[in-house]
Image (cartoon, rainbow, N blue to C red):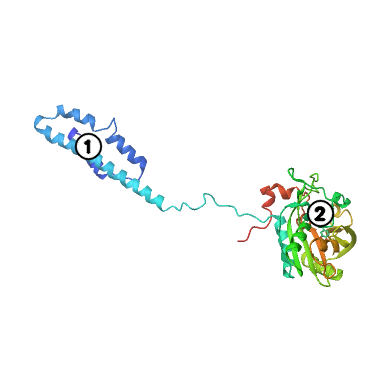
Amino acid sequence: MSVYDEVQALLSEVRSFETQSEEELEQFRRKFLGSKNIIKPLFSEMKNIPPEKRREFGMLLNTLKREAEQKYNALRAALISQQQQRREHLDWSLPPLPMGGGSMHPITIVLQEVIDIFKSIGFEVAEDREIEDDWHNFTAMNTPEDHPARDMQDTFYTVHNPHWLLRTHTSSVQARVMERQKPPIRIIAPGRVYRNETISARSHCQFHQVEGLYIAENVSMADLKQTLWYFARRMYGPDVQIRFRPSYFPFTEPSAEMDVYWGLETEADYRITKGTGWLEILGCGMVDPAVLDNCGIDPDRYTGFAFGMGIERQAMLKYKIDDIRLFFENDLRFLRQFSPVIH
Ligand code: DAH
């Protein structure tokens, strides 16, 4: 093949070259336009061309060079605009990976069940602060300083002011509500409480309670029992057995604790109910007249009942969880086992 034919062949290669691949285009560039391109040495062939044909050969080489440049620039531009278009079609607001849905914390599930039951019979949800003052947590609840009952609840006090503390029970919300609301009062107060206790599988320095308070004229112990029995049937099924045991709390008189019969089928049932089959779920009683008086409600006119239940123990039984610490560690392997959040 003569040099002339060789150049002609290269020219038709350039003319017919098409690509959408960056890599192929780069190969093309190196071959025709790079520092060691194939055209350059052809210029030095000029001296071997008969003089009358040199002009034509020179023009042909220049055409080859020019067309290779044009072809490269055109394909490069097409490639760039194609990439841009592709980028414009992407929705940059989409999350980078499929996002795992969250799940409801078991404490939230149980809290919500309790709240729903009481809401359905006319109780309103009252929430209040976790950093509380001594008066609302203790004194108003008929537990003045030096009262031995203060020892029942080991307390975290704030460092800068010993009158401030982390509430030890949601009973403090009773005082907050009575201060701002006149009877009839019918509230539940769900929330977190804190006690200075050694952390173990059975107890923690933080946990959850739901407080209940009903104050009106002529509220009696029968109302208390009927309300809690209704709650127990909704929460634990229509055949649930409950029992009330006399107890003591400074803020109620008389006071009681309510147990639910859980059964003694498994080893865990045995351990958690201490071999009795009965599970203590709440404290309750008739609001002590001194509490009403402390909170500005006339104890000669109004009576009321109150109760306070722990949530962790109920959740532990419901989901067969044998270590209370799991609730607070936020281990995803634990949390993912509960029902997904429904939007
Ligand atoms: N505050 C009590 C506790 O944390 C629970 C309690 C008992 C609340 C009796 C009440 C009640 O309202 O009447 O152990």
- Quadrant where the image shows the C terminus: bottom right
As helix, strand or loop, the secondary structure at mark 1 comes to: helix
**Residue 5, placed above or below residue 228:** above
Which residue is under mark 1? 65
The picture quadrant where one finds residue 249 is: bottom right
Residue 23 is situated, as x and y percent measured from the top left of the image, at 36, 40
The reply to whether callout 1 and callout 2 are in contact (CB within 8 Å) is no
User: Which amino acid lies under the numbered mark 2 shown in the image of this protein?
Assistant: Phe
User: Which amino acid lies under the numbered mark 1 shown in the image of this protein?
Assistant: Lys
Residue 120 is situated, as x and y percent measured from the top left of the image, at 72, 69
How many neighbours does mark 2 have within 10 angstroms: few (below 14), some (14-19), or many (20 or more)?
A: many
Q: CA distance from mark 1 to mark 2?
A: 95 Å
Which of the two residues, 209 or 242, is positioned nearer the viewer here?
Answer: 209
Which residue is under mark 2? 138
The picture quadrant where one finds residue 246 is: bottom right
The answer to whether 166 appears left or right of 220 in the picture is left
Q: Is residue 4 visible?
A: yes
Question: In front of the other: label 1 or label 2?
Answer: 2
As helix, strand or loop, the secondary structure at mark 2 comes to: helix
Q: Is residue 257 visible?
A: no
The answer to whether 235 appears left or right of 40 in the picture is right
Which of the two residues, 313 or 186, is positioned nearer the viewer here?
Answer: 186
Residue 237 is situated, as x and y percent measured from the top left of the image, at 79, 66
Ligand number 1: quarter of image: bottom right
Query: Residue at left 72%, top 66%?
Result: 124
Which of the two residues, 266 or 292, is positioned nearer the viewer here?
Answer: 292
- Quadrant where the image shows the N terminus: top left
**Residue 161, placed above or below residue 340:** above
